[in-house]
């Protein structure tokens, strides 16, 4: 059979549909990120943002400030560093305008070095001093609105809005006269506030741009093996509701030689209910077309045929087991071993319901006799096989069970007399 596809995903649903030829604009795999998944992604992004902002150094500040009695004083702050950030709560809310992420109740600690110098006609020599200081920001709120768009099959992320607000900012100087303390607060508090806000907004915007670049590098196809690749081109625009994000990709397998499967494909109709229960972070819906595209590709590649020389009941591959049902076979080739050449005559047709998955397989079986060094074809039997089973999640893997529903045999040609196909079919079943 065609190589199995292993999906290392959370719950997988399947959808049935009506027969349709392939369309490059159709989406056959749908991924829905639930509210729980969005919260997980938000927490991860907030954590990365905090890491990128910690120990961030801001530009230094210098200015001249007129102080009563003292006169003009040259003041400055350098080595302004965000030493720690703590975010008490954050939320994410998708909507028609985009995805809104808000971090609130945050606190920020900063440290810096300060200095001043001045001279007056009363004090002809230059007076200067320096020291360290700390800043504590409370009640900071950061809001970000991002949009996701489909650009030529690739997701594009853009920042629609980004803002930062501080409720309070307290500067504590180590040393310095009272006149200097008040003058410094008056001259530098708003500047430090705006510097921190600008730095946070800039970092978040830069992070969003890096995330957009990462999305641009997502492959438009993933090689499954040397024969086929999975078309991972995004189709349609991302769908945002008040609690989820839905992304659709083409999802069909394509041949490595660029030949597309043109038949046996199905369009998604409605989802099955196989994912009912506890909400998961991510759900994946696969249409029948995904499986049928695989069967077409491997059929077109000529891989759906086998030479069978071993079976559980090995005696069945010897003419002695058939001497009563096919006497002419045993008379011509007594006690000779057989090899079965089995080839599918068309791609298997996969069908899916909410209860199970099945396939209809049409194949021809040529019976070959091993007579010394010769391989002699003696008959060809057409087989129609119906199988079905259930799909389940086992650990991180997609697993399942399959069983035989029915099969029928018909003789196409024979060099060893007439076959009683009804008797052979009943005998094989039992």
Image: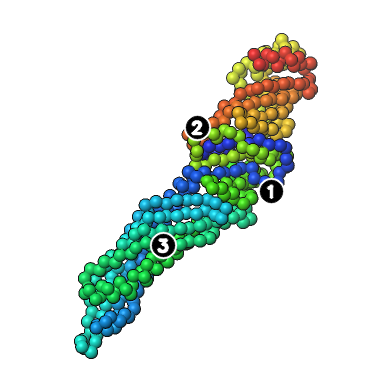
Q: Residue at x 65, y 26 (%)?
A: 387
- Give the residue at mark 3: 165
Find residue 408 and report its horizontal and vertical position in percent.
Answer: 72, 21
Q: Residue at x 52, y 43 (%)?
A: 34
Note whether 303 is above or below 89 in the view shown. above
Q: Earlier in the sequence, mark 3 or mark 2?
A: 3
- Pointer 3 local density, CA inside 10 Å: few below 14, some 14–19, many at least 20: some
Closer-to-camera residue (387/11): 11
Q: Residue at x 77, y 21 (%)?
A: 411
What count of labels does the image hold? Answer: 3
- Give the residue at mark 2: 394
Q: Earlier in the sequence, mark 1 or mark 3?
A: 1
Closer-to-camera residue (299/188): 188
Answer left or right for 91 relative to 270: left
- Could you say which quadrant of the image residue 66 lies in? bottom left
Find residue 354 and report its horizontal and vertical position in percent.
Answer: 61, 31
Closer-to-camera residue (135/357): 135
- Give the residue at mark 1: 24
Closer-to-camera residue (94/384): 94
User: How many angstroms separate mark 2 from mark 1 (CA)?
Assistant: 33 Å
């Amino acid at each position: 059979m065609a190589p199995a596809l292993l999906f290392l995903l959370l719950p997988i649903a399947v959808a049935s549909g009506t027969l349709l030829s392939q369309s490059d604009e159709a989406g056959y795999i749908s991924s829905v990120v639930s509210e729980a998944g969005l919260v997980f992604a938000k927490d991860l992004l907030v954590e990365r943002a905090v890491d990128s902002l910690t120990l961030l150094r801001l530009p230094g500040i210098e200015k001249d400030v007129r102080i009563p009695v003292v006169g003009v004083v040259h003041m400055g702050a350098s080595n302004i560093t965000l030493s720690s950030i703590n975010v008490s709560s954050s939320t994410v809310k998708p909507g028609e305008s985009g995805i809104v992420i808000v971090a609130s109740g945050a606190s920020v600690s900063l440290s810096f070095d300060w200095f001043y110098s001045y001279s007056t006609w009363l004090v002809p020599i230059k007076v200067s001093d320096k020291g360290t200081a700390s800043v504590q920001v409370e009640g900071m709120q950061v809001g970000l609105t991002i949009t996701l768009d489909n650009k030529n099959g690739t997701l594009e992320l853009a920042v629609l809005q980004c803002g930062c607000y501080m409720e309070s900012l307290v500067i504590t100087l180590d040393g310095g006269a009272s006149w200097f303390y008040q003058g410094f607060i008056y001259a530098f508090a708003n500047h430090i506030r705006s510097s921190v806000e600008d730095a946070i907004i800039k970092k978040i915007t830069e992070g969003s741009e890096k995330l957009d670049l990462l999305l641009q590098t997502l492959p438009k196809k993933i090689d499954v093996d040397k024969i086929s690749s999975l078309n991972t081109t995004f189709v349609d625009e991302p769908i945002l509701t008040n609690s989820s994000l839905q992304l659709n990709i083409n999802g069909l397998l394509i041949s490595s030689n660029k030949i597309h499967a043109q038949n046996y494909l199905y369009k998604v109709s409605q989802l099955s209910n196989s994912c009912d229960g506890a909400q998961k972070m991510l759900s994946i819906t696969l249409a029948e077309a995904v499986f049928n595209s695989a069967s077409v590709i491997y059929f077109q590649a000529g891989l759906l045929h086998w030479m069978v020389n071993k079976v559980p009941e090995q005696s069945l591959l010897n003419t002695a087991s058939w001497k009563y049902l096919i006497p002419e076979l045993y008379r011509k080739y007594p006690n000779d071993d057989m090899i079965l050449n089995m080839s599918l005559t068309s791609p298997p047709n996969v069908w899916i319901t909410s209860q199970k998955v099945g396939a209809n397989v049409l194949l021809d079986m040529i019976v070959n006799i091993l007579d010394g060094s010769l391989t002699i074809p003696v008959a060809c039997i057409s087989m129609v096989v119906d199988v079905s089973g259930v799909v389940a999640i086992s650990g991180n893997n997609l697993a399942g069970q399959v069983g035989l529903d029915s099969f029928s045999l018909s003789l196409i040609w024979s060099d060893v007399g007439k076959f009683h196909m009804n008797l052979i079919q009943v005998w094989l079943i039992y």
